Amino acid sequence: MKLSSRADYAAKAMLELSINPDRPVTLAYLARLEDISISYLEQIFAQLRKHGLVKSVRGPGGGYVLNKPLSDISIGDVVSAIDNPGGKTTENTATDETHQLWNQLSKMVYHYLDTVSLEDIHRAKDNDSVHQAA
């Protein structure tokens, strides 16, 4: 299992795009928000675009928008696009029991991340806000 800072930044960026899914967000804005370089974000967004998760909008007011509905983009999709571009599962031929245990755990984590959509995160956040206000 490979979860990197790149995947973390990608997930945060996707959540930012999902706040107003029809309004393009610039990489310059995201770079300021996360305090990272635009070139680093360009690499991340190249992978997200390659996997069909975002699309670019050209012209004044351009930037990036989600390429699918919130319910159709899982955190697993984002992590897989960034950390494991070839696919979600990696097969390790090692027979060591520890390696097998970590491989199984990795598969379980990816499976869970596949079940959590951007929409689920917004719904959970809205529910938390309602509960805190009560």
Image (tube, helix red, strand yellow):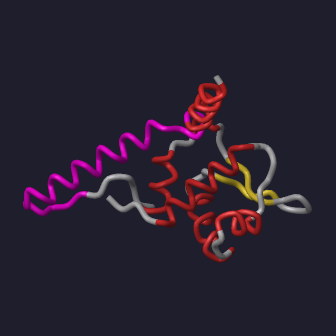
Vertical placement of 6 versus 123: above or below? below
Image coordinates for residue 65, horizontal then vertical, percent: 73, 51
Query: Is residue 112 part of the magenta span, yes or no?
Result: yes
Q: Nearer the viewer, residue 33 or 53?
A: 33
Quarter of the image that includes the C terminus: top right
Q: What's the residue at 8%, 61% (across, down)?
A: 96
- Report the quarter where the N terminus lies: bottom left
Give me the residue at 76% from left, 64% from top: 29
Residue at position x 29%, y 52% in the image: 106
On the picture, is 33 further left or further right than 91?
right
User: Magenta part of the protein: which range?
Assistant: 91-120
Farthest right residue in view: 60
User: Which residue sits at x=62%, y=58%?
Assistant: 49
**Quarter residue 11 falls in:** bottom right
Q: Nearer the viewer, residue 11 or 64?
A: 11
Q: Measured along the vertical axis of the image, is residue 49 above or below residue 19?
A: below
